[in-house]
Image: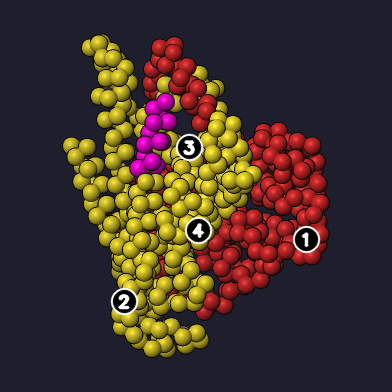
């Protein structure tokens, strides 16, 4: 570690620490506030008595949310999306990263394909043509619309290809001498040596699948097929009275809209908070690896 | 003969690429062909080439939209402010963190400030709509304690762009500091030792060693963000705006969404999207050139 630490004079050091602590509080406060709201009674929430601690503690909002079939359904869609989408993305990423990580001597088409994929990052047809193509391929209102069109995250390909390239050539040459083909080199040598990067990319992909909302919103016709984030978009952010059932309206008299919204928001971010320690451990590595030039 | 053996050797590579190539052809390249819709009056069910051609009609329609200039200006203004704040805040925080002696404190702060980056804009919008509400939001309640009148952060068109910039910084500055912290650790520590020998003050050390040491990263990231000047953040604005703030908060992407998806004016929406893509592409090209030039200056 060649980190340089400047010893600040006592008073300046104190100010520095105080400002940083304040920033940290500003970052975490809204999240804690939402958690407290979700665990407070409707009257406490409405009268503005909740700040950082639940007032008149109750889990009624969570019970209401977890008994709501529409919420559970969309939670299930999101879960399935992660379980199916992550392996699909990883397979596509690995299969493209390998050929692109070869030298030009090994793979004459390398430069062409690098540009073939890179162009899609630099230029796109825009929202409407993209939507039309998905409709033409029959994916509208299908679960696969959430998986197939975005199956190849080009940024992750670059990350993984760079990591493959940083693995010593000698190892692969020796294996090739022993008659190993591309598949063997990929599966037996490169993948086992790239586990940290693979873990990083897997986490990134899982988080982005969990967080995606726009595709669900415009590609699904029936709200029953919405993933959780699209469902929340219509319920919490952009409330549409038509989405409320009679049951909801009756129950809303007992528990406030506000505390249930808070509960739904918190449940939706819970998976992210749960994998966060792993995310934090890996993403710094990931960023550094991504910037290694091949 | 050799070439043929080489091809056989390459076959598995083509097999690996095949599924992705098909996928990208269908879902990335075909939509590029779809930009012909910008020159058509798109009729439902007529397909890509069945609709009547209308030349530049859609573009003229766009140019004559009463709000178009305002929307372009809103986009550039919000994106520009975000770009500036997106450099200044992370650099400052990284410099401050670099001065912290306690590892535990440093790590705790880092752990907390990275969190918002991983939440979706839907979730963040859900939180913001609640805490920024003028009637019951906790932010206005706390402002009330110090005697400030409630601010309608999301409904006042004079405040809205600043709310967008601030909340964008809130969500992303932590993540941005990682890059600058990494750049800071790459600075040769002997430079500081030499400076101390020569009697440099801490201010001078920051000005003559630290900032030049990370200026390469700063210049590169700011130049590249130029390519994003027409992206003011669809996810954020779409989830937080309302007709109340269209005058300052409506951006190109939200306009495309409303014209295309909600009003079914596919041709017009595609035309706007195409204009945006072309300008962005030119800007990205220029930005990369500029970044390369600056980087060269820095290296040699």
Residue A175 screen position, x and y as percent? 45, 49
Residue B79 visible, this orientation: yes
Q: Residue at x 45, y 21 (%)?
A: A16
Q: Which residues are magenta?
A: B83-96
| Discs 2/4, front | 4
Membership of A243 in magenta stretch: no
Residue B236 visible, this orientation: no
- Which residue is under mark 4? B244
Q: Chain of mark 1?
A: A
Check whether the beta carbons of the residues at disc 1 and disc 4 lie within 8 A of each other. Answer: no
Q: Indicate the colour of chain B.
A: yellow
Crowd around label 3: few <14 · some 14–19 · many ≥20 (10 Å)? many
Q: CA distance from mark 2 to mark 4?
A: 27 Å
Foreground residue among A212 and B169: B169
Q: CA distance from mark 2 to mark 1?
A: 47 Å
Q: CA distance from mark 1 to mark 4?
A: 27 Å
Q: Secondary structure at mark 3?
A: helix
Foreground residue among B206 and B28: B206
Tell me which numbered mark, 2 or 4, is placed earlier along the sequence.
Answer: 2
Q: CA distance from mark 3 to mark 2?
A: 43 Å
Crowd around label 4: few <14 · some 14–19 · many ≥20 (10 Å)? few
Quarter holding the C terminus of chain B? top left
Check whether the beta carbons of the residues at disc 4 and disc 3 lie within 8 A of each other. Answer: no
In the image, residue A247 sits, relative to residue A21, either above or below, namely: below
Q: Tell me, for residue B60, which label it has, or none.
A: 2
Check whether the beta carbons of the residues at disc 2 and disc 4 lie within 8 A of each other. Answer: no
Structure colour scheme: by chain
Check whether the beta carbons of the residues at disc 2 and disc 1 lie within 8 A of each other. Answer: no
Q: Secondary structure at mark 2?
A: helix
Q: CA distance from mark 3 to mark 1?
A: 40 Å
Colour red maps to chain: A
């Amino acid at each position: 570690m060649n980190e340089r630490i400047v010893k600040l004079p006592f008073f300046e050091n104190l100010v520095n620490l105080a400002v940083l602590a304040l920033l940290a509080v500003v970052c975490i406060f809204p999240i804690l506030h939402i958690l407290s709201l979700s665990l407070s009674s409707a009257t406490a929430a409405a009268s503005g008595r909740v700040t950082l601690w639940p007032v008149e503690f109750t889990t009624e909002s969570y019970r209401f949310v977890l008994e709501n079939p529409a919420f559970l359904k969309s939670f299930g869609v999101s879960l399935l999306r992660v379980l199916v989408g992550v392996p699909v993305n990883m397979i596509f990423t690995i299969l493209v990263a390998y050929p692109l990580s070869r030298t030009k001597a090994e793979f004459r088409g390398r430069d062409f394909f690098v540009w073939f994929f890179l162009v899609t990052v630099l230029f796109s047809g825009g929202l409407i043509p993209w939507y039309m193509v998905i409709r033409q391929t029959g994916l509208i209102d299908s679960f696969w619309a959430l998986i197939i069109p975005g199956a190849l995250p080009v940024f992750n390909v670059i990350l993984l290809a760079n990591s493959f390239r940083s693995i010593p050539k000698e190892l692969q040459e020796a294996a090739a001498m022993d008659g190993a083909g591309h598949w063997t080199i990929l599966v037996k040598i490169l993948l086992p040596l790239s586990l940290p990067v693979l873990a990083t990319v897997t986490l990134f992909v899982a988080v982005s699948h969990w967080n995606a909302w726009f595709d669900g919103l415009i590609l699904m016709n029936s709200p029953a097929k919405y993933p959780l984030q699209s469902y929340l978009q219509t319920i919490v952010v952009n409330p549409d009275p038509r989405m409320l059932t009679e049951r909801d309206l009756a129950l809303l008299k007992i528990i406030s809209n506000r505390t249930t919204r808070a509960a739904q928001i918190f449940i939706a971010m819970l998976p992210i908070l749960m994998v966060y320690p792993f995310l934090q451990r890996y993403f710094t590595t990931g960023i550094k690896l991504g910037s290694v030039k091949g | 003969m050799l070439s043929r053996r080489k091809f056989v050797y390459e076959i598995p590579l083509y097999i690996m690429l095949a599924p992705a190539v098909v996928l990208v052809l269908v879902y990335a390249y075909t939509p590029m062909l779809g930009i012909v819709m910008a020159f058509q009056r798109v009729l439902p069910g007529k397909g890509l080439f069945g609709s009547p051609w209308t030349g530049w009609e859609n573009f003229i329609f766009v140019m004559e939209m009463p709000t178009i200039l305002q929307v372009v200006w809103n986009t550039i203004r919000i994106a520009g402010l975000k770009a500036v704040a997106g450099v200044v805040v992370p650099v400052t925080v990284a410099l401050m963190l670099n001065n912290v002696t306690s590892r535990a404190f440093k790590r705790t702060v880092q752990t907390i400030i990275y969190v918002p980056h991983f939440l979706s804009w839907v979730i963040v919008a859900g939180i913001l709509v609640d805490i920024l509400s003028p009637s019951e939001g906790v932010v206005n309640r706390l402002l009330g304690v110090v005697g400030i009148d409630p601010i309608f952060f999301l409904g006042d068109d004079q405040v809205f762009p600043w709310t967008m910039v601030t909340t964008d910084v809130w969500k992303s500055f932590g993540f941005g500091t990682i890059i600058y912290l990494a750049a800071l650790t790459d600075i040769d520590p002997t430079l500081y030792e030499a400076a101390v020998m020569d009697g440099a003050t801490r201010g001078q050390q920051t000005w003559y060693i630290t900032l030049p040491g990370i200026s390469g990263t700063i210049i590169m990231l700011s130049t590249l963000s130029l390519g994003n000047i027409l992206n003011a953040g669809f996810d954020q604005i779409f989830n937080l705006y309302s007709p109340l703030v269209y005058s300052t908060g409506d951006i190109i992407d939200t306009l495309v969404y409303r014209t295309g998806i909600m009003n079914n004016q596919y041709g017009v929406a595609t035309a706007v999207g195409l204009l945006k893509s072309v300008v962005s592409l030119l800007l990205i090209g220029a930005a990369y050139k500029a970044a390369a030039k600056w980087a060269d200056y820095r290296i040699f």
